[in-house]
Amino acid sequence: MPEPSRTRPRSIAALLSLVVVGIAGVPAVAFAAPADDPDPGGPVPACGDVEAPPDCPEPEPEPEPEPEPQPEPPLPVPESLPAPPALAPPVPAPPAPSAAAHVVPRLSIPARGTAVRANRTTGRLTLARVTCWQGPCTITARRRIGVRIDGKRYVARVLGARRTRTGQTSVLRLQLTRAALRGLDRAAAPAQVEVELTVESPTSTVDQTVLLTLR
């Protein structure tokens, strides 16, 4: 009868041989280290290393740097500005009349010897205009004067106010008769008339002689 102690070891050895044979049948790649790995026992490469494993997620792209603000370009300066339009020189104001000019009466008459045509309808013509600056003013002139036309004498009258107040103007006119007007139309030469005027105010007196040529 065989010894039991020696039979059992053989069975265990057979079992171990089967396990070894089974393991040997597994591909060597599953247990062997890569051939190009110089240090199979070294540290496993991480995702951030140069030799990262293929199953690592792609790294997030770095944000692009914001562009630096550029200074605004200066505005173009024109080479030359247009000249402003020339302004007309101010018109000087007329000089204010003196106080004396407003005291002496003003006597406006035609120039000596001026030819004046009498109105053929009314027979009148203007002799003078008298302005009284400080009144009352008194105007003195002959009421009737003689006019010689073509050698014949005619009578004319002087019309107009003889007394004026401050600031008023009196117009003196000469009134010819119809006969004198007909004589002027037939006369070969113009006739002349002369009238003396005197204007008195509280401060002054003005004398003037009016000489006109009748047509």
Image (cartoon, grey):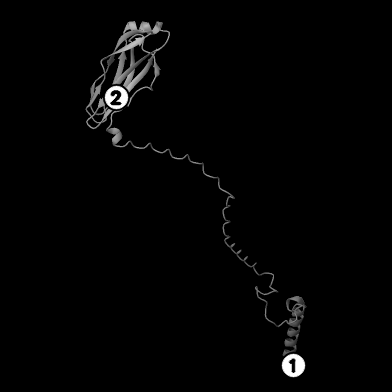
User: Residue lying farthest front?
Assistant: 151
Expressed as whole percent of the image width and height from the top left, the position of residue 90 reads 43, 40
Query: Can you identify the residue that label 2 sits on?
Result: 130
Mark 2 or mark 1, earlier in chain = 1
What residue is drawn where x is 31% and y is 24%?
208
Q: State which quarter of the image contains the N terminus.
A: bottom right
* Camera-side residue of 83 and 163: 163
Residue 125's spot in the image, x, y percent?
34, 15
In the drawing, what numbered circle is on residue 87?
none
**Secondary element type, mark 1:** helix
Residue 169 in view (yes/no): no
Q: What percent of the width, then of the height, locates residue 174?
A: 31, 15
Q: Secondary structure at mark 2?
A: strand
Residue beneath disc 1: 6
Report how far apart the C-alphas of labels 2 and 1 lie in the structure: 179 Å
Which residue is more in the foreground, 182 or 146? 146
From what the image shows, is residue 120 above or below residue 24? above
Number of residues whose C-alpha sits closer than 10 Å to that of mark 1, classed few (under 14), some (14–19) or many (20 or more): few
Identify the amino acid type marked 2.
Val
- Is residue 4 shown left or right of residue 163? right
Eye-nearest disc, 2 or 1: 2
Quarter of image, res 6:
bottom right
Q: Residue at x 31, y 17 (%)?
A: 173
| 170 sits to left or right of 5 | left
**Amino acid type at image mark 1:** Arg
Within 10 Å of disc 2 (Cα), the crowding (few <14, some 14-19, many 20+) is many
Q: Quadrant of the C terminus?
A: top left
